[in-house]
Amino acid sequence: MDSRPASDGLAAPRMPVYLDHNATTPVDPAVVAATLPYLTTHFGNPSSGHRYGLVARQAVDEARQQTAGLVGCDPKDLVFVGSGSEANNLALRGAVLASASHGRRTIVTQATEHPSVLATCAALRRAGVCDVVVLDVDAHGLVDVEQARSAIDATTLLVSIQYANGETGTIQPIAELARLAHKRGALFHTDACQAAGKISIDVAALEVDLLSLAGHKMYAPKGIAALVRRHEIGLDATTYGGGQEGGLRSGTENVPYIAGLGRASVLAKENLIGEGERLRALRDLLYEELRARLTRAVHLNGHPTLRLPNTLNISIEGVDSRSLLAATPQVAASTGSACHTGTGEPSGVLMAMRMPPERAAAAVRLSAGRTTTEADVRTAVDALVAAVHKGIGDA
């Protein structure tokens, strides 16, 4: 966090405390080191038959095993793609297009999903290839299991429920919902991009058929992600060509970033329990300090216990969150998902939780990460409290 000399000899501005890890994480130095050999010496195409290609192919195979190990799936069931959004598109579009003649044509999802799920569902519905049912959530962002039970029927092809919400951190009852889908003969997909690397995930125990994860949410580079697909499930490809990734995502593999994702998966698995406890303590300290030092009410948005260990979403009564964050350059945080930043509208996630518009407009998401310290938390609290006490951001 110290200032460093700029190129003109002047001190560079002090970087803010970074509390936006749900938007993206910094790339871990060990992950950077894992990518470098495949950007330089081992630059071969993994589809080539000579030594350069074989070394690259070995790197892809090893990373597939490492990434599969994080979520407890068979490495053969893991497909590398370019982003979490692409993984979600492959799961939804792939399942619908591969099953068009099977009689089932309904996707059941829920109101606080990532835009890559909701927009894909909307596009498939516009194309006339499926029907879509969107489940409500309660005031904490949880899906109503009984509503899901009523909605999933003999026409349901796929149920897609996000594992953990990126704005509030609310964790859904995935295993229960997956069992419910299977009782009705439907497939189950979960977007686990925010959950992977933060909480323990076991595909076999959850009994999910499809699961998405993204590298840049777990200290790997942007531009690499994966879809877990139970091997007997047929999917239509998103990209056609040379047949890479089991024919589901043709195109030469991004070997450096795949190697980085593998290394990031190993690090996440090794540190999962201890890091989760540390982040939970920092998250709770942040919340309690803000509540103790502000005379205005501080409302928690999201489930009080079924929540990612690093995620705090709060509304400070009578404060406009955009103005507040603009007035606290010492803190890098957000008012919601990075996918919605700049829209000027209250968070769709919070509105789906039936939150009053003024409370939604006051929401700030603070998400800690591997580099966050207690000193960072206290610096952020000082900055936010000072701004509120000055009346900055008053709605």
Image (cartoon, rainbow, N blue to C red):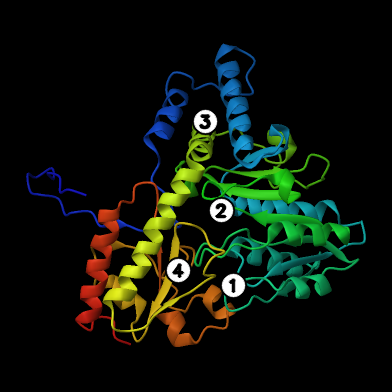
Say which quadrant the C terminus sits in.
Answer: bottom left
Q: What amino acid does circle 1 point to?
A: Gly
Distance, label 2 to label 4, CA atoms, is: 17 Å
- In primary-sequence order, the first of circles 3 and 2 is 2
Residue located 78% across and 47% down the image: 235
Residue indicated by mark 4: 336
2 vs 4, front mark: 2
Please name the amino acid that badge 4 sits on.
Answer: Gly
Whether the residues at callouts 1 and 3 have beta carbons within 8 Å, the answer is no
Which one is in front, 161 or 91? 161
Q: Nearer the viewer, mark 1 or mark 3?
A: 1
What amino acid does circle 3 point to? Ala
| Above or below 131: residue 35 | above
Residue 195's mark?
2
* Residue name at image x 51 percent, y 43 percent: 272
Q: Which residue is mark 3?
A: 259
Which class describes the residues within 10 Å of circle 2: few (<14), some (14-19), or many (20+)? many
Q: Residue at position x 30%, y 51% from top?
A: 373
Using a 10 Å C-alpha cutoff, classify the residue at mark 4 as few (fewer than 14 neighbours), some (14 to 19) or many (20 or more).
many
> From this viewpoint, is residue 20 visible?
no
How many angstroms separate mark 4 from mark 1 (CA)?
14 Å
Expressed as whole percent of the image width and height from the top left, the position of residue 327 reads 24, 73
The residue located at (47%, 65%) in the rendering is 337
Q: CA distance from mark 2 to mark 1?
A: 15 Å
As drawn, 89 above or below 290: above
Residue 245 point in image, percent of width and height: 69, 35
Q: Secondary structure at mark 4?
A: loop
Residue 250 quadrant = top right
Residue 54 at what x, y percent from top left?
Answer: 60, 16
- Residues at discs 4 and 3 in contact (Cβ within 8 Å): no
Residue that label 1 marks: 141
- Amino acid type assigned to the residue bearing label 2 in the image: Ala
